[in-house]
Image (cartoon, coloured by chain):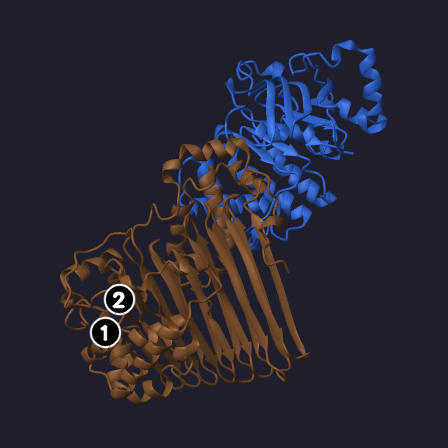
Amino acid sequence: MSADLAPALNNKGLPESIKSESNKSAGLEGIGNDYKYGFSDKEDYIFKSGRGLTREIVEKISAMKNEPEWMLKFRLRALDIFNKKPMPTWGNCGLLNDIDFENIFYYIKPSQKQETDWDEVPEGIKNTFDRLGIPEAERKFLAGVTAQYESEVVYHSIREDLEKQGVLFLDMDSGLRLHEDIVREHFATVIPAADNKFSALNSAVWSGGSFIWVPPGVKIEIPLQAYFRINAENMGQFERTLIIAEPGSFVHYIEGCTAPTYSTDSLHSAVVELIAKPGAHIRYTTIQNWSKNVYNLVTKRAVAHEDAKVEWVDGNLGSKLTMKYPAIYLLGERAHGEVLSIAFAGEDQHQDAGAKIIHAAKNTTSMIISKSICKNGGRTSYRGLIKVYPKATGVKSSVKCDALLLDDKSRSDTYPTMEIDEKDVNIEHEATVSKVGEEQLFYLMSRGLNQDEATAMIVNGFFEPFTKELPLEYAVELNRLIQLEMEGSVG
Amino acid sequence: MTSPNTNNSSGSNSDLSAIPLLEIVDLHVNVEDKEILKGVNLTIRAGEIHAIMGRNGSGKSTLSYALMGHPRYKVTSGKMLYKGQEISEMSPDQRAKLGLALAFQYPVSIPGVSVSNFLRKTVNAVRGRDIPVKEFRLELKALMAKLGVKDEFLSRYVNDGFSGGEKKRLEILQLSMLNPSLAILDETDSGLDIDALKTVSEGVNALSKADTAILLITHYQRMLNYVQPQFVHVFQDGKIVASGGSELALELEDRGYEWVTSEMQETPGTGPNAKTSSSNASPSPAVVGAK
C-alpha cells in the first residue's frame, strides 16, 4: 500500500469548457465563504481568564466549580504532563507548531447558571442558539439537549419520561457534582491524561461537555444532542464527555459545533470517553462544522465489552486542522465496532482523520468506512490502525477508505497501519483515490444539470453511505451544506 | 408491427420543415488533436427518423458526443444548428434544455444516487420547473410499466451494478421522461436480448412524434426491424458516404460495408464532398417490415 496515493491519479486537467464555466462563478469559490455560522456576539461574561496557561488558572477553574480534591489533583497532574510532553511529531506538524498556547483563553464563564428554559438563557446567547436552530431542533426531534457556550453549558433539558427511567443526561460539571461516585469510577479510565499532549491539556483545564448514564436495559429511541459554540476570539474550548451505557442499554448521542470566523485561531480540544457494558449499544454522531480558524484536536475513544456495539459516525466539514481518530477497544467477546466518517477539506483546511480499532477478544468484528473529499487545495488524510491481539481468534475487520479529489491542487493521503498478531482472522482493506470523472459530469450535464449541480450530485452520492446513517433532518442539512460548498467549486 | 412515422416524410410535412430541427454543415471534430469527423453534412426535420450506420471506429459515436457537447470533442470547423441556433459553444445542460437528449452507449454509474432522485432532479432541470411529486410519480410509473421496468429500479443507484440491458432500459426511461425534440440513440440495441430489444424499440417509437425527431446510431440492422427510419446514412472515416431510404439498411446487411465503399467511388453524387441531407436523399416508400 502506497502511503501517498495522489500521484497514481489520472492527472489530466479538466476540460477547457469546464474551466471557463467555473471561472464565471469564481466569486462563489472556496469553502467557508458561505459559512453561515461565522457571526460573533458581543462578549459579556461573568469570568474570563487571562491569556496563557498557569497553575493558578487550573486552580481557579477547579475552585470556581467547587470540585472535590481528587479532581483538582487530577488536573494539576495533567498540567505537569502537558508541560512535559513534546508536540506530536506526526500529522501536520507545520500547522500544529503554529499553535500559540500563550495566546489562548483557557476558561470563559459566559453566564451565572445553567438554565432549563430557553427564555431564561441570557438574551445574546439565546439569540445565537436560535440562529443555529437548536431550540427548534429540540422541539422537533430530540430527547434531550445541552448547549455549551465557551466553557460552560448554558442550557440543558431532558425529556421527562427518560428522567423517570433513570437516564442521566447532564453537563459534565453537574455530573461530577451530583453523581461523583459514577464519575470517579469511570472518568479518565478510557483516556488517561497521559495519553497524548492534547488529552493532558484537556484533563488540566476541562470544562463542560456531557455526562450520560443509561441504566441497564433502557433504550433511548430518539437522539440526545449537545451543541458546542465558541464565541470569543482565541478561545480554548475543552469539553469533556463521558457516556456510560449499562448492560443491554442503547443511546444515540449527537454533537454539533460551530464558531465565528476570526483572523486568529481558536482551539477546540475535547476528550470523549464511551463505555459500552455487555450487550450495550452506543452510537455517537458528530457533525463538526467549525469555522476555518479553529484547531480541532480531539481524543475520542470507546471500550466495548462482551456483545456490546459502538459506532462512531463522524462528519468533519469545518476547522483549520482536524486531528481526530475515534478509537474502539473491543474488550469482550463478540463486541462490534464501527467507524463511519466523512471529511471535507477546502482551501486552507487539513482534515487528518481516521479510526483505530483494537481487537482484544475473540470473535470481535469491526468495520471502518472513511470517505473524504478535497478541493481548492484542501488536504485530507486517512490515518488508521487495526490491531489484533494474540489469541483473539475469529476476528473480522473490513476497512474501506475512498478519497475524491475535485481538482489538481488538492491532496489526499492514506496511512493505514495493521498490527495483526493472530493468524485466525479475516481482515480486508481497500483504498481508492479518484477524481470527479469527466464522463460522470458529462452524463449528468447532458441530462440538464449545470456543472455545480452535477458535481454536488456526485459528491452527495459519494457521501451517501454516511448520510443515510444520519437522522433525516441532519442528512437534509448536510446535503444542503454540500450543495453550498459546491457552488463554483470545480476549477 | 407498424411505425407511425412511415408516411411522415419531410415532403409531406412542409410546415414543420421550414426550419430544420438539426442542420449540420461540413462539421469537423477533433478528439485530443486527432480529427475524427471530417466534414459531416446532415439535415434532420421534425417528424423524421434517421439511422446512421457504419463500422466501429467510423466516427458514429463521435457525432453523438459532439452533438451533446462532450468537452473533449472539439468542433474545429463547420456548423451545428439546432432550430436555427448555433449550439457548438453551448454546455451540455444548455443543449439538454433546448431539447437534445442522448441515450448513451455506455452510461456511467453514479454511486450513491438513487434512480428516483436522479430522475426527479434531471427532469425538473430540463423542464425548468419542479413537477409535483405525485404528478411525477404517476407519469414515471406509467412509463416504467410500458418499458417493463420494475419498481425496485427506483431505489437502486444510477447504473451501479446494472446489467447491459438494464442500463439501456434506464436510458430509454430517462429519454421518455425528458421528452426531447431530438433523441440521439447511440448503439441502444447493443447488449439487448430479443425481448428487451422489442420493449426498448417500442419506447423509442413512442419518442417519435410530429414535432420530434430521432437519430439512431447503430452498427447492426436488427433494431431497424422495430424502429423504422425514413433515412439511412452510411458513415465511413468520419463522413457520410451514402444516404438512402430504409432499403439501404437491408442492402448493407446483405452486402456489408465494403460494398458502399466501392459503390461510392462509382457514384460521385453521394461521394465524400456531396451535401447529404434528407432533402436530397430519396426516402423509399417501401416499409421495411419486421422479419
- The CA distance from mark 1 to mark 2 is 9 Å
First in sequence: mark 1 or mark 2?
A: 2
The quadrant holding residue A114 is bottom left
Residue with the mark numbered 1: A57
Which chain letter goes with mark 2? A
Badge 2 crowding class, 10 Å Cα cut-off, few under 14, some 14 to 19, many 20 or more, is few
Q: Of the residues shown, which amino acid type is indicated by label 1?
A: Ile
Element assignment for label 1: helix
Q: Say yes or no: labels 1 and 2 on the same chain.
A: yes
Work out whether A289 lies above or below B218: below
Work out whether A460 lies above or below A271: above
Q: In this view, does A164 lie to the left or right of A433?
A: left
Q: Of the residues shown, which amino acid type is indicated by label 2?
A: Gly
Report the chain shown in brown: A
Report the chain shown in blue: B
Residue A159, given in percent of the width and then of the height, sits at 27, 75
Residue B276, given in percent of the width and then of the height, sits at 68, 15
Q: Do the residues labelled 1 and 2 touch (CB within 8 Å)?
A: yes
Residue appearing at x 41%, y 82% in the figure:
A249
| Mark drawn on residue A52 | 2
